[in-house]
Amino acid sequence: MRGLVVAVAVAGVTLAGLQGTALADTAVPVWQPQGTAVTGAATTAEAQALTAGGTYKDTLKVGDTKYYGVDLDAKSAAYLSAFAIPKPGAKVTYGDGIELKLQSADGTDCDSYDAHFDNDGAARPVGGYTARTIEKGGRCQEANRYTLEIKRESAGTSDPAEWPVEIRFMSEPALKADAKPAPATSATEASPTPVTGTPRPAQGGTSFDNAAAIKSGIWNDKVLPGETRFYKVPVDWGQHAVLFADFANAPTAKENGFQSAGVRVDAYNPARGHIDDDTESYAGKQTSITGQTVPVSYANRFESSGKVSATRFAGWYYFAVSVHPGVKNVVDAPIGVTLRLDVKGTAAPSPGYDGDAAKAGFGIGGDDLAEADGTATGGGSSSTLRLVAFAALGAGTVLLLSLAVWVMTARRRSRAAAPQAPQGPQPGYGPPPAW
């Protein structure tokens, strides 16, 4: 009997401990980098080559500048994206982040992109891409070995822990010789109207790879302080997306609690290029962020505006919804978010690729709309999900645990009193069932 009491007491302590840590930084689902492990070189001469269509993972220490080789032809556009993923709650400053640069063999700067946290303490996945665009009279048009440079920027007061990094290399086919793409467009709606209807549940993913697929409609989710959730939206040629992200009030908000840039939405294109972002402060009261993309056109890539240039191909567009880690000082609970999404415009024909652009990640497939049901396309951290689920269990679980311990104790006593069985596997005592 004493063993049963101890077991029940331990179970109760375990549950209490889990409940106490459910919203700690360790419980925040985190992007786990995917792909082939690589080690960036210290010089361009030693740079390991990346392959088109490949995804890679590496790490960055404070002060690191790493180089990766890229072999490009003279006709395909190339997109080299990189995202740094500090642990939730890590101390970062406004200017911390990563800087990307694509260079030719003769040292010409083909393109560059800087991604910073933009707010003190706002640790979250940050990144974007550098691109080699095929255009008449443009730089870096020849076939050759190019180099991707990734540099980490961190202040002396920031958390010095390594940052995991995910790198992706996407290659976009050239157009056919007789292709006539539509002209560029930068038109946006002056006063977009949010969609109405019945909300559906969505479960945002931890990264681009397992982003929740959603389409026009209203979607409800919850985001923890320090968490970033990803959603992907199929946007075809000639179409554009309008998003209203409504962050709910928190009835249990702490008095005078306030976090500048407490909630944030970032928009990315199919090659993980950053389009735009917006933030709002959060003090436990409802607030909203509204954003929209311009209609997708191949010719947009030649425009000077980054927001227009990024909407250069059809495919899955992404929205990353982040809650600042400091919001835990306002409310120690997930914040409800309602995404009112409207993909507008009639889908136009492809500009005429000389190759399978959809296979390379540029375009909308026939099953994309059917897939957009609000669920994540891959798993997050199963251990985290189990932790939160276990922590949510109550007294009924303790009762079941007590019963289970009682049954096991009775079986042990029964076996101890019975004659010893021959050694070897015993029926009925296999591994526990999978979750």
Image (cartoon, grey):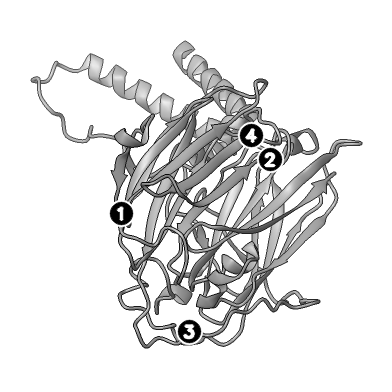
Q: Residues within 10 Å of mark 3 (few under 14, many from 20)?
A: some
Whole-number angstrom distance, CA of label 2 to CA of label 3: 44 Å
Q: Nearer the viewer, residue 347 or 369?
A: 347
- Secondary structure of residue under mark 4: loop
| Cβ–Cβ under 8 Å for marks 3 and 1 | no
| Cβ–Cβ under 8 Å for marks 2 and 3 | no
Pick whichever of labels 4 and 2 is earlier in the sequence. Answer: 4
Q: Is residue 393 above or below residue 296?
A: above
Whole-number angstrom distance, CA of label 4 to CA of label 3: 39 Å
User: Which mark lies nearer to you, 1 or 4?
Assistant: 1
Residue matched to label 1: 144
Q: Residue furthest right?
A: 256
Q: Residues within 10 Å of mark 4 (few under 14, many from 20)?
A: many
Q: Which mark is residue 96?
A: 4
Q: Amino acid at mark 2?
A: Pro
Q: Residues within 10 Å of mark 2 (few under 14, many from 20)?
A: many
Q: Residue at x 34, y 84 (%)?
A: 177
Pick whichever of labels 1 and 2 is earlier in the sequence. Answer: 1
User: Which mark lies nearer to you, 3 or 1?
Assistant: 1
Residue matched to label 2: 225
Q: Residue at x 74, y 78 (%)?
A: 189
Q: Amino acid at mark 1?
A: Asn
